[in-house]
Image (tube, grey):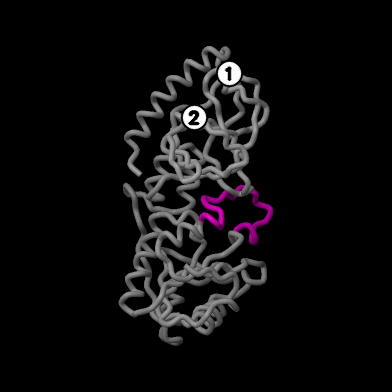
């Protein structure tokens, strides 16, 4: 997959089959769009083009709203789109000026004149342009005028619920990581650098790797204890993760730490990836280290069982 950071970098693409959107999470509804994009590329002997934006438009349009957390960093999104088989990815800087483009300007100047789109594929209820004025009906009106085809992918449902980035974020904020996985089509992941902690876990037989999440807007699921898979140096291990304030040891600082099963390597300063499989319990205060250790032993048994039966 070739990645471009501006319209000027984009080469002439023969029979461009195009879609555009934020694609946060590259979830099942996004994947349906990408699958159709690839089908149309074969039919028209063309190439697929995904147009997305950085930063997320909401961060530019509503800078005072600090509540938005993202399912993926840009690098994670790029990796997901490449894995999906996209030929060309155009990452456009989203600015206040860009947000003022009317839907007509967006269609005429970018979709038609710059990309020279053969077919434009959009998701269900997609909006674009200044004040989100652009709709599927708007696109149909201009497609005949400018000579491109337009196709809308219907709403994608899982268990009668529509799939969306917003719904996935809400599930993760509640700790419902299995629900999020159903909508994503894979486990939710969190990456970070292993930093040195207080090493309390070692004293009770449960050493942990403390994770520093570097991206300020990356969504960290709700506090609690989770069964997880851990990717270290391209090797996958089972483990259990605790997110919270560690009340039993009088923690005052929020932390994300993972105990990796059957693992003894030193991995300080390494980047590791956590895959959330299922939530085991909420974080709670115990009477002391002995009671905490007994609970962690129970947690490990439950995590091992959950990992053995994991679907993804």
Q: Secondary structure at mark 1?
A: helix
Image location (x, y in percent) of residue 222:
53, 36
Question: Which image quarter: residue 238?
Answer: top left
Q: Nearer the viewer, residue 76 or 279?
A: 76
Whether pointer 1 and pointer 2 mark residues with C-beta atoms closer than 8 Å, the reply is no
Please tell me which of labels 1 and 2 falls first in the chain.
1
Q: Residue at x 32, y 49 (%)?
A: 160
Instruction: Relative to 252, say whether 3 is above or below.
Output: below
First to last magenta residue range? 58-76
Per the image, label 2 sits on a secondary structure element best described as strand
Residue 196 place in picture, x, y as percent: 65, 33
- 59 with respect to 83 (left or right): right
Q: Nearer the viewer, mark 1 or mark 2?
A: 1
- Picture layout, residue 29 above or below residue 308: below
**Front-most of residues 245 and 45:** 45
Magenta: predominant secondary structure element?
loop
Question: Residue 141: in sight, yes or no?
Answer: no
Q: Is 73 in the magenta?
A: yes
Q: Which residue is mark 2?
A: 225
């Amino acid at each position: 997959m070739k990645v471009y950071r501006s319209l000027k970098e984009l080469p002439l693409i023969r029979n461009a089959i195009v879609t555009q959107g934020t694609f946060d999470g590259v979830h099942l509804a996004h994947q349906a769009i990408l699958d159709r994009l690839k089908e149309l590329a074969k039919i028209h002997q063309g190439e697929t083009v995904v147009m997305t934006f950085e930063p997320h438009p909401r961060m530019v349009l509503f800078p005072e709203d600090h509540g938005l957390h993202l399912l993926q960093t840009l690098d994670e999104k790029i990796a997901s789109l490449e894995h999906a088989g996209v030929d060309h990815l155009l990452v456009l800087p989203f600015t206040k000026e860009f947000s003022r483009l009317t839907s007509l300007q967006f269609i005429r100047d970018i979709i038609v004149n710059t990309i020279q789109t053969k077919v434009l594929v959009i998701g269900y209820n997609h909006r674009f342009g200044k004040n989100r004025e652009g709709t599927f009906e708007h696109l149909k009106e201009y497609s005949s005028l400018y000579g491109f085809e337009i196709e809308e992918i219907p709403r994608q449902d899982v268990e009668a619920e529509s799939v969306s980035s917003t719904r996935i974020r809400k599930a993760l904020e509640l700790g419902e990581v299995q629900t999020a996985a159903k909508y994503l089509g894979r486990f939710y992941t969190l990456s970070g650098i292993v930093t040195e902690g207080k090493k309390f876990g070692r004293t009770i037989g449960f050493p942990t790797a403390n994770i520093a999440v570097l991206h300020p807007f990356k969504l960290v699921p709700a506090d609690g204890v989770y069964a997880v898979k851990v990717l270290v140096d391209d090797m996958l291990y089972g483990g259990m993760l605790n997110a919270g304030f560690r009340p039993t040891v009088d923690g005052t600082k929020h932390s994300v730490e993972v105990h990796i099963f059957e693992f003894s390597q030193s991995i300080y300063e390494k980047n590791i990836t956590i895959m959330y499989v299922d939530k085991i319990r909420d974080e709670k205060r115990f009477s002391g280290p002995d009671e905490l250790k007994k609970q962690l032993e129970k947690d490990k048994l439950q995590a091992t069982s959950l990992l053995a039966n994991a679907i993804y």
